[in-house]
Image (spheres, grey):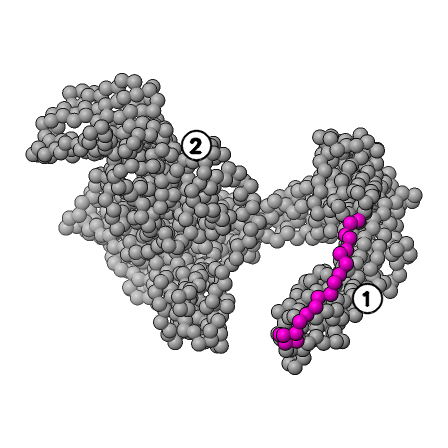
Amino acid sequence: MPEPVKKAVSAFAKKPKAQEAEEGSSVVFEAETVKPDAKVKWQCNSKDIDSGDKYSITAEGNKHSLALKAITKEDANVYAVIAGGSKVKFDLKVVSKPAPVEAPADAAGETVVEPEHAPAPPAEDQSAAPAHDAPPAEEGQPPDTRQDLTGLFTEKPQSGEVTVGENITFVAKVNAESLLKKPTVKWFKGKWMDLASKSGKHLQLKETYDRSSKVYTFEMQIIAAKANFAGAYRCEVASRDKFDSCNFDLAVHEACAAEGFDIRAAFRRTNEGGKKRSGQQSSNDGKEDSGELDFSTLLKKRSVHVSAEPDMDVWNILSHAPSSEYEKIAFQHGITDLRGMLKRLKKMKKEEKKSEAFLKKLDPAYQVKKGHKIKLAIEVANPDAEVKWLKNGQEIQPSASKYIFESVGNMRYLTINHCSLADDAAYCCVVGEEKCTTELFVKEPPIEIVKNLEDQMVMKGERVELECEVSEEGANVKWEKDGVELTRDESFKYRFKKDGCKHVLIINEATKEDCGHYKVKTNGGESMAELMVQEKDLEVYQSIADLTVKAKDQAVFKCEVSDENVRGTWYKNGAEVKSDARINITHIGRIHKLTIDEVKPEDEGDYTFVPDGHAFNLSAKLNFIEVKIDYVPRQDPPKIHLDCMGRTADSTIVVVAGNKLRLDVPITGDPAPTVIWTKGEKASSVKHDGEEKEGPASSWTSKAGKVVTEGDTRVHVETTKGHCIFTIEGAERQDEGIYSVVVRNPAGEDTADINVKVVDVPDPPQAPRILSVGEDCCVVQWDPPAFDGGQPVLGYVVERKKKKSYRWMRLNFDPYPGTTYEAKRMIEGMEYEMRVYAVNGIGMSRHSPASQPFVPIAPTSEPIGLSLEDVTDTSISLKWRPPERIGSAELEGYGVEYCKEGTDEWIPAFEGLTDRTSMVIRNLTTGDKLQFRVRAYNVAGASAATTLAQPVTIREIMQRPKIWVPRNLRQTLVKTVGETVNLLIHFQGKPRPKVTWTKDGEPLGPELASVRNSDSDTIFFIRKTERKHSGRYDLQVQIENIEDTASIILQVVDLPGPPQALKITDNWGFNVALEWKPPKDNGNCEITGYTIQKAEKKTMEWFTVYEHYRRTNCVASDLIMGNEYIFRVFAINMVGPSEEPCTSIDSAYIQKTGIEYKPPTYKEHDFSQAPKFTHPLVNRSIIAGYSTTLSCSVRGLPKPKVTWYKNKMDISNEAKYRMLSKQGVLTLEIRKPCTFDGGVYTCKAVNDNGEDIVECKLEVRPQIPKEEKK
C-alpha cells in the first residue's frame, strides 16, 4: 500500500462539536485557534455567515463562538468554521420535543472530558462523498475545494473519510462518446506513487462500460483501511491527445477506544501531547495521526532507559516489513541514523521464496493485435496437477473456437483465438492454492481510409454529403473543418451518419460560411476535401422576342430560365398583366409563357417578365398590324408586305441554332401569286417561270397553297390567304445566308431579300496547357476556340478535378476574359486535371479535352547547416543537413556550386545531382578563395541556396596526430581462446598520418592479426584468438617528426589444466585429509578455486564435496563408515573448470567404530613474520583538482604499524591526507591535490620482526583552461 504522507497541521486547538437543540431555544458553538490573531470565518451550507438578528459571532483572543437564536427546523444544517487552511464541519440537529439530557458522569476528584468528535459507526462500504450527518472533520486543503465537471470526467472522485478496518470506494466516470480510443485511468497517491502495482489485499481497481450510455466507470476500492492510508490521492484519465486529472483526499479515523487511561496521550505529536492528565483523553482530529507515537523524549534519555522487553533482531523485522513501515520501526527501536539503516538494508539479500507449484510463471503482461491469436504458457512442477484459467476472476470454459486448453507434460497452454477488445483483461492461472497472473493488452490495428473524400461544389441552400469509407466497420472517426473539430450542435447543422464502413458528414442547407477544407481523421490516416458554396445565379436559356401580329391572331411570349422553381410576373407598359378569358399565363418547369388570343390594337406595347427574387427582367415588344382591305380589280399585281425592324427590305434576322426559323411574309395579289423561296442569291437573279440562273444553293416553290419543289426535309413552305410562311425546323449553322422570296402572278411580281444569321455556342477550346505549378496552385493556358458561334466570346469557365475522382469542380462562375488562369487552393501532392469551357452571348460550349495530369508541388526549403568539414591543397569537403520542409514530392538531390571571390559566376562543382549530404570537391586550385553554396532539387525545381558564412582558401591545414583510445581498451582486454578480436581506434592528423602496429616491440605480421587503416581510424582484427596472441600491442601514428602512441594489452585465456599430485595425507574417523598441487597450466589467468568430488568405490557415483575451494588442501568429512572412497579435483579459472580432473591414486577406507585413533603430535608452528609488501606502490600522473589514491598491500605478524611519508616527511597528522587500512590493503587518499602535492611518497611498515619500505613518484599536472583547448 502507499507510504504514509505527512499530515497537515491543524489551525484549531479546540474544535466545535455537533449539537442537538429543540425548537425555539438557542445554541452556541465554540472554537479555539492555536494563534490568537488568526482570522476565523463561519459558514452555513458553504455560505458565509455575518452577525445579525439570527446569528451572533464573537471573538476574544483565540476563543471564537457562534450563537444561534430562536432555532427553527430550517436551522438544521451543516456548519463550518475556517481558520487559515483548516476547515472543520459540524452539524446542528433540531428536535420538536425536548429530550432528557443525562448529566455528565463525574467521579470524585476526577474529570471526564468528552471527546470532540466520535467516528461514524462502522459500515460495510462507505461512500467516497461525505454525508451531511458525518462527524466534523478538519480538512488539510484550502476551504471550499469543490470541483466542477470539466474536461473528460462526467463524475469525479470526491474526498472521503473512513474508520480503520472499514472499506471505502472512490468512483470516476468518463463519457467516451467523443473519444476515438478507450480512455486509460491511473490512480496515484501523493505525487508519484502509481497504485496499479499495489493491487492486492487492501486495494482493488475495477472498470465497467455501459454500451447504451457509452460511459466508462472506474472504481478504486480500499479494503480494511489502515491509518497510514490517509493522504492526498489523484486520478488521471488520458485518451490519445486528451488529458484530465482531479485530486481528492482520504481521512482515516481511529476506531473508538475503551474508556480508561490511555498511555499514548503522553506521546502524541500534537501540542497537547505534553499535557498529561491521569484519566484524561486529549482531543483528536480526524486528519491527525492518532496511532503514531512520539518517542523523541525517550530517545533523549535512552542512556538511562532500561527496556523490559526481550532482545529482538531489528534487522530481521525490517527485512520482512514494507518500506512504508521503516520510519515507524526505526523510532520504536531507537534507530536515529535512517540513511545508514537504508544503506544496510539495501545490501542485505532477501531470500526469494520459490514457488512449489510453478516452475515457470506467466510474464507480467502480453500484447496481441486484434484478430490474431495468442498462446499463454506455464510450466508446473507436478505433471498431473490440475490447472484452472480465470479471466477477470471468472473461470474460463474451454470452447472449440475461442479458448483451447492444452496439457503437454509439465506444460499447460491457453490459446485465445480471434482476440477482440473484450479479451483485453487480467488472466490468472490457478494450481492448487497458488496462482500466477498476467495482463493481456489487445492492440487495435490502425483504421485506414479506403475511399477518400471528394471535392464538392454546391449552390447555396443545397444539401451536402461528404462520404468516405474506412477499413473496419464500427470505427470511430473525427471530422474537422479548417482544423476545428465538428460536433453535433443544437441546430443540428452537422449530422454524422455511419453505414458499415461508410461514414457520411451531412450539412443541411449549405451557406457561404460552410466553405472550407473538411478533413476526416482516423488513428491510421486522414483525408481532406474542399467544399465550395456559390450563390444561385439565374441563367436565361431563351429570352422573349419581339412579335408582330395581325388582328385576331395569337401572340405568344415564351422564355426559359435555369431554375424551374423560380416564379415571375408579367408586365405590360409597367402594369402587371392578369389572366383572363383572352390572356393566359403558364409556368411549366423552366418555361414561362404569356399567351394572348385574338390580338387587338390595344394589346400593342412593351411586355416584360420579372423573375421573383432576381434583379433583372426580360423585355420584348408586341407590334400590331392593321390589315386594310381595299377594292382592287381582278388583276392585282402581287405585293410583299414585309414589316421588319426599320421596315427595310434588306434586313437581318438572327436565330439561335436548334430553334425554329419561321419567316411569315404577308403578300397580296389577284389571282393568288406563286411564291418562290431561294437561298444563296438575290431575288433579282431569279428568272421567270421558275427558271434559275446557275449557282443558287436551293429553291422552294409554292403555288396555290401547295409546295411545288422542296429541297430539304427540314424546310416547310406554305401559302395561305394573304401569307407566305417559310419554316426551318431546328436551324443549323449551314442554314445561315440570304433568303429571297419572289411572288408572281399574271399581273406582275414582287421580290424581297431576307438575311438570316444563325448563332450558336462556340466550339470547345483545345486541351489546356499547364505552364507552371506551385505548392497549392498552377497556371493554365489555352487557345481560343476555332469558331466563336457567330457571337463574340465573352470569356471562359475553368474546371478542375482530382485524377482519381469523377467530380469536376468549377473554379469561376463569371466568365474569365483571358486565356491564362491561375488556379489556387489545391492540395500539395494530389494529382489534378483541368478543362475549359468557352462562353458567348448564346451560352457555354462543350468542355475541352482534359489537360495532362499534374501535381501541385513547391520547391523544398533550403538545405541547413552547411559547414566546412575538411580542406586540402586541391580539395574541400562540405557537409549539410536535409531541408526542414521537403513537401510531398521526393527530393531528387542536391547541387553544389562555387564562385571565386570578387566574381558573380557560379560554377557547378559536378555534373548532375547527388543524393548524399556531404561532398568532396576535388581538382581545385591551391590558394584560390572560393565561396560555396548548396541547393535542393525536386520536381518543382531548385530551392533557395544555402551559402557558407565566409569564403574558404584552398590550402591544407596542419593537424597534430592524436590517438583516441576507447575507454574499454585502456585496461587489459581479456578474450577466450577462439573468440574474435575486432578493435576500431580513431585518430586525427593532417596530412594523413603513417600508422604502425607492433607486438612486444616487434613489427606485427599478417599471420598474427589483420590491420586496415583509413584517414581517421585503424581496425585491428583477429579472426580466432590463440594463446600466442597474448601480449602488448603498440599503435604509433606519425606525421613527419611528430608522433603519438598508444598501447593495448591483450590477454587470451583458456581452460586450466588438471591439478597435480592429488594424495590422501591422513584418514581418521569419518574424515579424510587431501592435498594437491596447482596445475601446470593455469589457462593464462589466475586459478579462482577448485572443485573436490568423492565417489564410493563400489558405485563410482561422484558427489561434490567443495566448490570454488581456494586452498590446495582440504578435509572431506561426514564419510560413511565401512565404505572405501576415492577423490578427484578440478581446477577452475575465469573461463571455467578444467576438462580433466586429477584423481587420487590411493583410496581411503573408513574403518568401523571400536578402533582407537591415536592422533599424531605436531610441533606448534611459529607464524610470526616480518612485514613484507606484496603489492608495491605504482607511479601515478594525475590532474590537479581531482582527488586520487595510492594503494599497496602488506603482510606481517604481528600486524605492522604503517607510516606514510612525502619526500621523507611524516604526513600522518595532516588533514589533507586520509590513510585507510583494510585486510592488509593500505590506501592513501589525497584530497583535491595541487601541483605542490607532487613528489615521492613512501609507505613504511614496522613490527617486532622487522620493517619494509615501498615508495612511488606522484606527478600532478595543472588543468588546461577551456580557452586553450579550443
In the picture of the structure, the residue carrying the numbered disc 1 is: 1080
As helix, strand or loop, the secondary structure at mark 1 comes to: loop
Residue 842: x and y, percent? 41, 50
Give the label, 2 or 1, closer to the camera. Answer: 2
In the displayed structure, would residue 826 be above or below residue 115? below
**Nearest the camera: 787 or 560?**
560
**Nearest the camera: 559 or 536?**
536
Magenta span of residues? 1151-1169
Residue type marked 1? Lys
State how far apart marks 2 and 1 are (Cα): 68 Å
**Nearest the camera: 310 or 535?**
310
Marks 2/1 in contact by CB < 8 Å: the verdict is no
Residue type marked 2? Thr
In the picture of the structure, the residue carrying the numbered disc 2 is: 297
**Nearest the camera: 74 or 673?**
74
Q: Give the mark nearer the N terminus: 2 vs 1.
A: 2
Task: Provide the major secondary structure of the magenta segment.
Answer: loop
1012 relative position to 121: left or right: right
The answer to whether any part of residue 578 appears in the image is yes
